[in-house]
Image: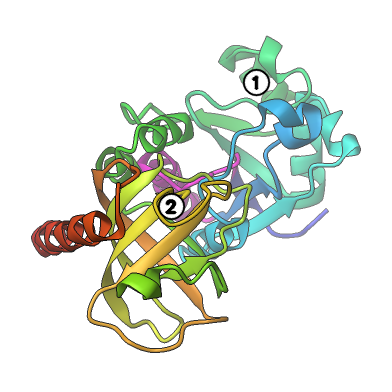
Amino acid sequence: MESRKRIATIGMFDGLHRGHQAVLGILCDEAASRRLDPLVFTFDRHPLETIDPARAPKTLMDPDLRDELIRSRGIRVERVQFSDKIRNLTAAQWLRRMASVYGVEVLILGYDNTFGSDGRNLNIDDYRHLAAEAGIELLTTSAVPGCSSSAVRRALSDGDTVKAAEILGSPFTVSGPVVHGRQMGRTIGFPTANININPRRQLPLRGVYAARVINADDNVYNAVVNIGNAPTLSDGSTLTVEAYLLDFSGDLYGRTLQIEFGPRIREERHFASADELINRINLDIARARKLLKKN
């Protein structure tokens, strides 16, 4: 057993939306008032990736970034590998482990959160009773209306990146290295950075978006980002994320870029000719400049 006494919470915290931020705020406030060390138990993957991969949702945030942001609040993060052993722990076993191994005296449970192999059959009174048996005081939090990871995914699936940002409390962001692509954009005067995004990451609905792109040197560029198959210039067989950085020239290959999505400009579509596509891209650029100027 660790000698330090702790107050903890548990969950995936995927996306760190405003509901998650409220829980972390309560955790820190209670930790300060009770003179306990704050601790977050989170996981290396969504439990469904082990239990039922076909039903597992795509992630909203890279786990390393999630943990870094939580730690920036002065909170210890215990990232648990979701193995079969962990999968089979009951709620009572989890609570005893928290108390005996980590010195947890208080547990904060989100309003809709459950844990343990038997969690789906337990209500808040059950958790409170089991926690008391383990010597843990259980606190619960209220809902932040409309804030959930599922709500963020629904908004992104609809292409509503503005709503997603409202739920998250910041723009939806993805990142990845720039890789060699078809290099078709440069043939029409719009060289794009083809960004390799982890296939487990959630993406917005296919289409064209205003965005800001940040490189490894923290330089920020306005951009037009296309998510889709580029049907006018290719056979449309490969999904790509391509960013055209406004007012930029240079070599980006191998660099990691971060995309902060602004509003969706339009759906992806097939154009009858390259000239028609060029005209549309110029309109997209003008629209992106206006949208990003407002933000």
Residue type at mark 2 is Ala
Residue type at mark 1 is Tyr
> Could you tell me what secondary structure mostly forms the magenta stretch?
helix
Report x, y in % for residue 268: 34, 44
Q: Which residue is mark 1?
A: 127
Name the residue rendered at 39%, 89% in the picture.
250
Confirm whether the magenta stretch covers residue 24: yes
Magenta segment boundaries in residue numbering? 9-35
Question: From the viewer's perspective, is 129 left or right of 175?
Answer: right
Residue 230, label in figure: 2
Name the residue rendered at 66%, 34% in the picture.
136
Callout 2: SS? loop
Q: Nearer the viewer, residue 261 or 145?
A: 261
Question: From the viewer's perspective, is 126 left or right of 102?
Answer: left
Question: In the rendered image, which quarter contains the C terminus?
Answer: bottom left
Report x, y in % for residue 29: 40, 50
Name the residue rendered at 51%, 23% in the picture.
112
Which residue sits furthest front? 273
Question: From the viewer's perspective, is 105 left or right of 266?
Answer: right
The mark lying in front, picked from 2 and 1, is 2
Confirm whether the magenta stretch covers residue 19: yes
Q: Quadrant of residue 124?
A: top right
Q: CA distance from mark 2 to mark 1?
A: 51 Å
Q: Nearer the viewer, residue 146 or 41?
A: 146
